[in-house]
Image (cartoon, rainbow, N blue to C red):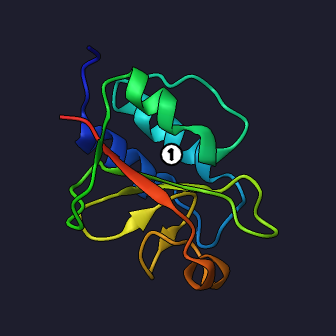
Amino acid sequence: MSYWDKNAAVSYLQWHAESASQGHCARYVREAIQRGGISLMLTYSARNYGSSLICTGFYEVSDANPQKGDVVVIQAIMNHPDGHMAMYDGAIWISDFKQQHGFYPGPAYRSARPSYKIYRHD
């Protein structure tokens, strides 16, 4: 199992987050996870990162109380075929930007409420 430094991952993501979405959520979150000590297999779409997270020691959690370092993988919606992923910093969800309204990144996601899974690494 890989060494996981969630504080390093979260700090990296906080420091690199943009003021608005850049359309590169998967890259930002993947790079933050790598800064935390874990290299994920690359996938084209954010919605496909679940198996890569599982293979590196993350596991699915079902509780509604996210913890610092948790990663959400959200499935696709209309006009957003790649889905979304973000990491919880202990207060808010961050992807390529600091999300102020929960883990769904925008109004289209909040309206559609697509399926998602939250992953944690101890």
In the picture as drawn, the residue positioned furthest to the right comes out as: 79
Q: Quadrant of residue 57?
A: top left
Above or below, 1 against 63 in this view is: above
Instruction: Indicate the amino acid at tag 1.
Output: Val
Q: Which residue is mark 1?
A: 29
For the C terminus, the image quarter is top left
Residue 44 percent across, percent down from the top left: 73, 36
Residue placed most toward the observer, 113 or 85: 113
The picture places residue 98, in percent across and down from the top left corner, at 48, 69
Image quarter (top left, top right, bottom left or bottom right) of the N terminus: top left
The answer to which image quadrant residue 14 occupies is bottom left
Residue at figure coordinates x 77%, y 57% from the top left = 81
How packed is label 1: few (under 14 Cα within 10 Å), some, or many (20 or more)?
Answer: many
Q: Is residue 107 above or below residue 92?
A: below
Comparing 36 with 51, the one in front is 51
Q: Residue at x 51, y 72 (%)?
A: 104
Q: Is residue 54 left or right of residue 29?
A: left
Looking at the image, residue 52 lies above or below residue 79: above
The residue that appears at 45% across and 62% down in the rendered structure is 94
Q: Residue shown at 63%/72% (left/top)?
A: 20
Q: Is residue 25 left or right of residue 38?
A: right
Give the percent coordinates (x, y) of residue 85.
Answer: 53, 53
Residue 46 x %, y %: 62, 46
Query: Dot 1 lies on which element?
Result: helix
